[in-house]
Amino acid sequence: MGRGRVELKRIENKINRQVTFSKRRNGLLKKAYELSVLCDAEVALIIFSSRGKLYEFGSSSTTKTLERYQRCCFNPQDNGAERETQSWYQEVSKLKAKYESLQRTQRHLLGEDLGPLSIKELQNLEKQLEGALAQARQRKTQIMMEQMEELRRKERQLGDMNKQLKIKVSMEMSSLEAEGQGFRGLPCPWNPGASAGTSNFAIAASNPMEIGPEPVLEIGYHHYNLGEGSSVPRSMAVDNSFFQGWTL
């Protein structure tokens, strides 16, 4: 049969009353302790037996809890400030615990303070390190591929610029050669009648013996032409003409 419902009234039997008090007191103290630990609550419990014996429990301090209770009950205007202060205190405690946990995790990742860790915790730490290493290598490979692609793009740009410069230089050289040929085809200004590449000066310089004698000034000189049939010697004719010219 199941446990029946117990009627709540004073137990008349003294022995039964004492046994029930002891059991219920221990259970109540246990529940108060569990509440303070699980819910981070400030609990204070005060029990007086029928003989006047005191039983108490306080998560922090029973006296401080009673003082706080008195402040909350008799100073209602400070109730809001007290709650806010308590809230901030709890928040600071949580942040402090989180900060200590992060510091401990960081030391573990750096290979420090590994003594207290169990096999399972060490395996989890090893998996975390392997995952972080794989992500770091993947990111490094991605950055290297991006850099290589950027270098290829710059190489293509430089190649296009080089081709354009080659075309421009070839066009400039062609224009310069065309201008040089035009200058060589023009006639010399000091010899308009000469053909390209020739001049009278060059011909005269090439044949100095063909230049005729310069004219001689002749005053009172009569030139006599000797015929083919004349019997006078040529030397005498020249001498007579020379004397005749000067004796006039």
Image: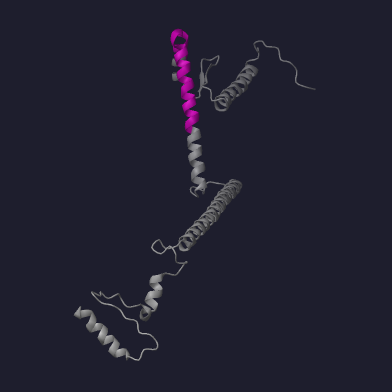
Question: How many numbered marks appear?
Answer: 0
Residue 42, image x and y in percent? 51, 22
Q: Residue furthest left?
A: 247
Q: Residue at x 48, y 58 (%)?
A: 179
Q: Is residue 100 left or right of residue 228?
A: right
Q: Quadrant of the C terminus?
A: bottom left
Q: Nearer the viewer, residue 145 or 52?
A: 145
Residue 17, image x and y in percent? 63, 16
Is the residue 94 above or below the residue 145 in the image?
above
Q: Nearer the viewer, residue 174 or 133?
A: 174
| Residue 124 seen in render | yes
Q: Quadrant of the N terminus?
A: top right
Quadrant location of residue 8? Answer: top right
Whether residue 80 is in magenta: the answer is yes
Residue 142, image x and y in percent? 58, 49
Q: Main secondary structure of the magenta part?
A: helix
| Residue 60 seen in render | no
Quadrant location of residue 21? Answer: top right
Q: Nearer the viewer, residue 165 or 151?
A: 165
Tell me where the magenta segment starts and ends, as one range.
69-96
Q: Nearer the viewer, residue 99 or 149?
A: 149
Q: Residue at x 40, y 70 (%)?
A: 200
Q: Residue at x 48, y 16 (%)?
A: 83
Residue 234, image x and y in percent? 32, 89
Whether residue 192 is in magenta: the answer is no
Q: Is residue 118 left or right of residue 176?
A: right
